[in-house]
Amino acid sequence: MTEIEFAKTFLGEFSVSGDEIKPLYCPFCQGGTHRDKYTFALNQENHTYNCKRGSCGQQGHFSALCRHFGVEADQTPIQSKSVVKKRYTMPQTVIETAKDYVLDYIKLRGITEDTVEVFGVGDDGSGNIVFPFYRNAEQFKNAQPTFVKFRPSRKTQKGERKSWREKDTEPILMGLHLCRANLGTLYITEGEFDALALYQATGGAINVVSVPSGAEDFSWIETCADEIAQYDKIAIFGDNDDAGRRMAEEIEKKLPEKIVLFPDYELYRGCKDANEILLKYGTDPFIDILRSFKARPVEGLLNVAEIRSVDFTQIPRTLSGFKTLDKVLGGFLEGDLTVWTGKRGEGKSTFLNVIALRAIDQDKNVCIYSGEIPADRLKYQLSVCAAGQNNVDIIHDKGTGRDVSRVQKDKQSLIEAWMNGRVWLYDNRIVATDETDSIINAFTSAYRRYNCRVFIVDNLMTVALGGKAGEVLQLQSDFVIRLRKFAEKYGVHVHVVVHPRKVKGEIDDSDEVGGLGTITNIACNVLSVSRCSEAEAQSIQADTVVRCLKSRQTGSRGDVKFKFSPKDKRFWEPYSDGDARFGWERSEAQ
């Protein structure tokens, strides 16, 4: 249970101010003899509570408050302290009153001057429309927006940028300053003109906001968490296309505590969005569309006829970046789980570091559980791999006599900036007899808050399971099942490292993977990593072999050969570029 859920269940009438939830009366003392109001505060940021009445003085952690009322608090995600939380600046744009050329273009979109004035839309004096995003009525009154977005006051040409934002400002929902929580439902559109159109069509009778940056940016879920918390129902008036529908589905996943409502797209009359509907048909269609909003059917029951047909070439996936391996597997599909196995020291963890960095290169954020490697050493390994041979120096360690790789200082800061907010690490310093719930909760939060799409558990044997010795195999199997369900539910990919049974020679079959057979049965891919002997390496011109023992997607099996560079901990396919550049280096070269 979250703080806002607790407030709705136990605190009666309450208000939200910043991070604090303030009920009318303290749930312990009820305001005392004089019925003092608003003496109790529940802080959503620090997860603490306290009553300011001296004779009451109740205070403590939110988890203790939940236990007192017989419920359980949600576990908050543990994040790596090496990642710096993004800081935003206030917009500096001077927003001028909309001039005739702005108003003329907006009128062509069917929007009136009254609607323009209500949202504070103006221009920048250079021919561009300015859409200010105000967090509340006070900001609107003082003309101090949190976020500003621009677009030309004319029809854009093919290939021309349609919109842009003021750099480093905080992306929030547009229209929050007009919203009233007592209306009960928050309607979210995909574009600014759609929000204006829907507001105008309903005469401002409903709460209407638009997202800051289109259908694939969900940063507003974090930046507007307090505002969203005030609504039980979220209605997605998105675009009538694949991207708009995916946006609605993603919002439903990321806000599981909300009732997310979908429209009947057939009622759009062939139009793409709310603005086009208003322009072509006026306000009449909106009556039927608003009545059509409803939550999707009960989870767990599917009408086969309504299931969308699948084009397997279009299923979202994360590529390994290695052509032969991607051909064998078909890529790492979202919703799937891959088991990695191999003897100790064969390179499983190192290979997964490469997989993680290649995922980042595809704009897929990554979350890692590493039960064996401390956070600072994992960061070192990722940094060396990201750097590449040309950006790594070999330093002689006098204490051990070994040569050690070290990322060049000027490159380390660039790599950290590239990885910032893209790689999240579960804090394995947490002491718990059973880590399974903690890991699942942290992974879930990483998906919802930071849009992580690739997850790594390295390795299954280090996860504290909390059971008796004789129950370990079953508990490991149960945990992998939970990870697979997590992948399916949120459309992400999970990689799990599982040590093999004690076998001699190569691992040739899924049955040789450790644990119960359920682990490899439920896995979509099973891959084995093995290091070549000197003789074998010379014979096949490779240092490492990744053997595909199972691929549910393609049905393929086979070996993929790789070369390995100890200097930068990279794998690459023979005859390919072993010094390929990651995103941080490509950006530097531009």
Image: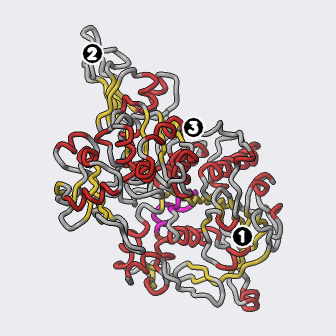
| Left or right, 486 with reference to 148 | right
Please tell me whether mark 3 or mark 1 is closer to you in this view: 3
Instruction: Judge the density around disc 2: few (<14), some (14-19), many (≥20) Cα neighbours within 10 Å.
Output: few
Considering only order in the chain, which callout, 2 or 3, is on the residue closer to the N terminus? 2
Considering only order in the chain, which callout, 2 or 1, is on the residue closer to the N terminus? 2
Residue 328 colored magenta? no
Considering only order in the chain, which callout, 1 or 3, is on the residue closer to the N terminus? 3
Instruction: Judge the density around disc 3: few (<14), some (14-19), many (≥20) Cα neighbours within 10 Å.
Output: some
The amino acid on which the numbered mark 3 sits, given as a three-letter code, is Ala
| Left or right, 322 with reference to 537 | left
Query: What stretch of residues is rendered in magenta?
Result: 365-379
* Distance (Cα) linking label 3 and label 2: 46 Å
Q: Which numbered marker is on residue 329?
A: 1
The residue lying toward the viewer, choosing from 54 and 264, is 264
Q: Which residue is mark 3?
A: 295
Residue 146: x and y in percent read 26, 51
Residue 366 colored magenta? yes
| Left or right, 513 with reference to 465 | right
Q: Pointer 1 and pointer 2: residues touching (CB < 8 Å)?
A: no
